[in-house]
Amino acid sequence: MKYKDFDGTIQELVQMKLKEIEEKENVRILHAVESGSRAWGFASPDSDYDVRFIYMRPMDHYLGLQAKKDFIDWELDETLDINGWDLSKALQHFHKSNATLFEWSNSPVVYDTSPQWAQIRQIAGTYFSCKSTLYHYYGTANSNYREHLTSDMVKYKKYFYVLRPLLACKWIEQKKCPPPVLFQNLVDEVLEEDMKPAVSDLLRKKVQMAEADKAPRIDALDDYIVDNLGHFKQLTASMEDDRNSDWTALNKVFIQMLSR
């Protein structure tokens, strides 16, 4: 995909944009990745690039009393969607076991990273909550199913936006850790063998369809989705709260990052 008058690769373009952000915003980017369908492994050829990054500002910024903006929305067009979170916001969301933030941490497409982020990621892992993350993926699957897959004719790409979070739920139920980002890894590890032909057939049909094309619903997948939505609704409701409420490790690493 070409970008205006830029002749390099997307990787080079994104890295150029990240340097531009650092210079103009006076920040240091700790980690930058691809998010969304390109990271999940089922993007369309014309899908945009969803670049997400974590950044930090100089120490003085955090010492003032005034309210502070903790995100940067940098670019949004037909090719690039670039935005990022301040380190303070990221650490607060790790404390909540934010599923999206764990996905950014585990994205298979990394544009830039740092030793500091590796340290943060290790500490953040101790704040992973099975219940809260399971609730996130169940809610995502349920809302996408209700919104996109209940008509007679549906967009087949929307099946992946339901199946992926459902398989993430299965991963958490079985392995008690953050699920992988790539859809195929979830299929290989936790999808039942008798469902793999249906998912393979769905992938084959999807690549032959335009983004806006619709086709009849697939009964086998619909039944599988409904059964699992019911199961994970009950499981999530019955689980005990397993969040780590202690702030000590996150506060310590935040202070360490600012002191460097």
Image (cartoon, helix red, strand yellow):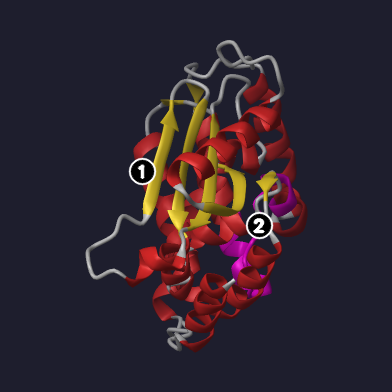
Q: Residues within 10 Å of mark 2 (few under 14, many from 20)?
A: some
Label 2 sits on what residue type? Asn
Pick whichever of labels 1 and 2 is earlier in the sequence.
2
Front in this rendered view, residue 172 or 247: 247
Residue 106 badge:
2
Image location (x, y in percent) of residue 58: 46, 62
Main secondary structure along the magenta-highlighted residues: helix
Front in this rendered view, residue 16 or 195: 16
Q: Residue furthest front?
A: 60
**Segment colored magenta:** 167-186
Say if 55 sits above or below 129 in the image: above
Front in this rendered view, residue 203 or 13: 13
Q: Label 1, on which residue? A: 146
- Foreground mark, 1 or 2, reads 2
Q: In 3D space, how far apart are the residues under numbered discs 1 and 2 (Cα atoms)?
A: 28 Å
> Residue 97: within the magenta?
no
Front in this rendered view, residue 99 or 224: 99
> Residue 170: within the magenta?
yes
Q: Residue at x 56, y 25 (%)?
A: 47
- Res. 149 visible in picture: no
Q: Is residue 118 shown left or right of residue 217? A: right
